[in-house]
Image: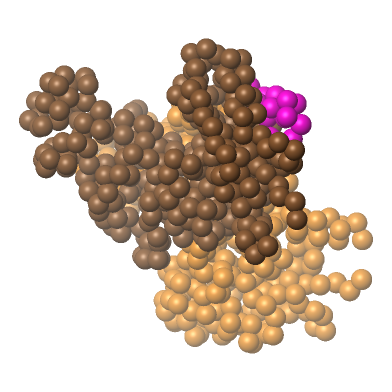
Chain colours: A brown, B orange
Amino acid sequence: MAEEYVIGVDLGGTRMRAALMDDDLAIRAREETLTHAENGFEANLDRMKNLILSVWPAGQTVEGIGVSIPGPTNPFTGVVELGTNLKGWAHIPLAELLSQEFGVPVYLGNDANVAALAEATRGAAAGYKHVIFITLSTGVGTGIIVDGRLLLGREGLAGEAGHIVINVDGDRVSTFEKEASGTALGRKARERVEAGARSLILSLAGGDAASITGKTVSEAAARGDALALELIHNLGFMAGLGVVSLLHVFNPEIIVFGGPVSGLGERLFGPMRAAIEQNCITPGYWNELVIALAGLGENVSLVGAGVLVLTHGGVESIARVKARLKAAAED
Amino acid sequence: MAEEYVIGVDLGGTRMRAALMDDDLAIRAREETLTHAENGFEANLDRMKNLILSVWPAGQTVEGIGVSIPGPTNPFTGVVELGTNLKGWAHIPLAELLSQEFGVPVYLGNDANVAALAEATRGAAAGYKHVIFITLSTGVGTGIIVDGRLLLGREGLAGEAGHIVINVDGDRVSTFEKEASGTALGRKARERVEAGARSLILSLAGGDAASITGKTVSEAAARGDALALELIHNLGFMAGLGVVSLLHVFNPEIIVFGGPVSGLGERLFGPMRAAIEQNCITPGYWNELVIALAGLGENVSLVGAGVLVLTHGGVESIARVKARLKAAAED
């Protein structure tokens, strides 16, 4: 049987990658180049087209191209609503532009949704049907799989659980992302240090409170700094409350965590589990729940972009993809 | 063509109802009796069997029986995990017990999920595929339809958005239900009155702060009482924040509100819309969102129990039911 290929593209704020994958989603060729975020849309579209050409298989059939986008994207119309940190990427009909160029179907997805598809197909959540993927990074990005299908909603804006409300103080409304991202960790540390708390954090930031980031806090925690450990504990607790909301809403089998903040390990996940066990209305929400770390590493967006093609933008069930991968493996 | 019938049962804490419906879900016969909640499970099972018999169509085929349960229920195993306010209803294999008795398939659903199915099939959300049903009553119950299918999760515990976290104060975690139910409205009024606030609320409660309920607050608001209006305004705002979380997660087309608290009208929905518009990350979440009141009234659970049968417990798409209803209408 003739092989079919898919191409995955991972558009990031600093670099873009493309991969040629076979029908088992194994990467056969991989190229990358810098994103010139400041040069606007047209220049980067040209770079993306050249990158795709550089992995195009000579004389072979390509089933489609999937693109992971850092920002809100409409998977039904193939329009990038807003490329985060990408100048000029607003209301861009990228699927149509690439499809005209290459003559194959093109599917878009935001990066968290794409990562969820990847992890649920070939990563830590392979074999599960009810999956929540959460990346704890600069922000909190999430992608949700309901009974084997990506949750998209009316216009593909679903699955943005980083923006669920978690705290209200008068008119000040705070969200999962504002409480549990790496940015939040840095901000909270700055506030405490500026209020006079003694901590290694300040010296690790070169004595400049304004330079404190989540990474500074992580480094201080590794050296046993009490304030850093307290802040990470609280971050884990708040992230746990975000998870509590998602458990009651989705009753998932597994939650997969990615992103650098997840690297904090048990200092984060211990208080997270405590928050979950203390605040779910029945143990049925967590007693068989699997909490896992993302398994695909730096290729997650490329593999997920491949899954975008196989699921037609996340609209079809990943069960179909898995069946096909299985059939391919048995050939 | 021979008609097929379904039977719907609505089990409530004070009464139970049963209806015989034709394949257009029109009610052909309807009976009700008191629930003797204190008499335990066995006595009420007998009452339920007799009630079902009282609407059974002589010499006709019944496709199945659906039962709306006031509490957590596993739709896959047909087990009632806990009947709220029903003594002895814990871990009851009700589907199996009724199926053995009547020789037809039996499907269970919790009352909010059943109401969501009903409203999405024949009520205010008929014709929509991405639906959130919220009942604001003693508690906050929700049922969620994702692309035409009821959201159930791993064990049918999904769709419990009343328990999403909305506020944290130290270790005190508060939820959508604790902030925006009728019980919450009464509690907040009691706290304010006990703290010395002057209001009609106290005299409407016969001078006894402990007797204040959500209904008392509603009555005081109807007479223009400032405290009652403020409390309802705040309730609407907090309910709006719960909705903000659900909009980012589901990107629905429509939210349907039921329950007595929804009867507060614009005093509630005005601040709710303000909270939504102020706190969504893009207007795309709300600018085409429909907010509607439930349309099926007191028959909602009976009709929804009928939909349970037609969707095999909510597992299959309501699109299938709608197609069938349409075909029936054209016969």
Horizontally, residue A213 falls left or right of residue A88, namely left
**Vertical placement of residue B63 versus B234, above or below:** below
The residue stretch that appears in magenta: A90-108
Percent across and percent down for residue B37 are 46, 75
Residue found at the very far front of the displayed protein: A58
Image quadrant containing the N terminus of chain A: bottom right
Q: Is residue A129 magenta?
A: no
**Vertical placement of residue B45 versus B214, above or below:** below
For the question of whether residue A152 can be seen, the reply is no
Tell me the quarter of the picture where residue B289 sits: top right
Label tally: 0
Q: Residue at x 30, y 44 (%)?
A: A263
Closer to the camera, A278 or B71? Answer: A278
Q: Residue at x 48, y 42 (%)?
A: A299
Horizontally, residue A180 falls left or right of residue A38, namely left
Horizontally, residue A13 falls left or right of residue B327, namely left
Image quadrant containing the C terminus of chain A: bottom right
Tell me the quarter of the picture where residue A136 sits: top left
Percent across and percent down for residue B175 are 37, 48
Q: Residue at x 56, y 69 (%)?
A: B75
Closer to the camera, A47 or B95? Answer: A47
Q: Residue at x 66, y 47 (%)?
A: A310
**Vertical placement of residue A239 versus B74, above or below:** above
Percent across and percent down for residue A150 are 58, 47
Q: Is residue A101 magenta?
A: yes
Tell me the quarter of the picture where residue A67 sits: top right
Residue found at the very far left of the displayed protein: A198
